[in-house]
Amino acid sequence: MSNELTNSTNSKELSRKRANNLVPIVKNQRILDFLPPGSFATIENQPTDLPPFQVIHCKGGRCLVRQQSWGRYVQWEVPHHRLNSA
């Protein structure tokens, strides 16, 4: 902490000085959809005749998805940024 903040006793002055230390917002960063297990998602550029994928698990920027017609043990790993909630 800087000396200005530790030596300041006026609370308004202290809050004014803290407000200048905010982190800038990154405008070009894409916000990812929240995809809990069991939800359905589409992949970017997915054909309209293909049904949405069921999300099995997401962790570390990767998601396991499956088609209901594929069977229980057939899964596909897809980068999270390519998925949109259906």
Image: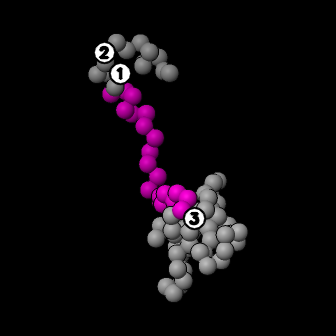
Residue displayed at 34% across by 25% down: 15
Residue 83, quarter of the rendered image? bottom right
Q: Amino acid at mark 2?
A: Asn
Above or below, comparing residue 36 to residue 9 in the picture: below
Q: Is residue 64 left or right of residue 54?
A: right
CB atoms of marks 1 and 2 within 8 Å: yes
Find the magenta span and give its range: 16-38
Q: Earlier in the sequence, mark 1 or mark 3?
A: 1
Q: In the rendering, at what x and y percent does residue 27 appear? A: 44, 56
Residue 64, quarter of the rendered image? bottom right
Residue displayed at 52% across by 69% down: 41
Q: Which residue lies under the disc numbered 2?
A: 10
Does the magenta-highlighted stretch encompass residue 25?
A: yes
Secondary structure category for the residue under label 1: helix
Decide if residue 81 is in sight here. no
| SS assignment for the magenta stretch, majority | loop
Q: In the rendering, at what x and y percent does residue 82 appear? A: 57, 69
Q: Which residue lies under the disc numbered 1?
A: 14
Q: Earlier in the sequence, mark 3 or mark 2?
A: 2
Q: Which residue lies under the disc numbered 3?
A: 55
Q: In the rendering, at what x and y percent does residue 14 appear? A: 35, 21
CB atoms of marks 1 and 3 within 8 Å: no
Q: Amino acid at mark 1?
A: Leu
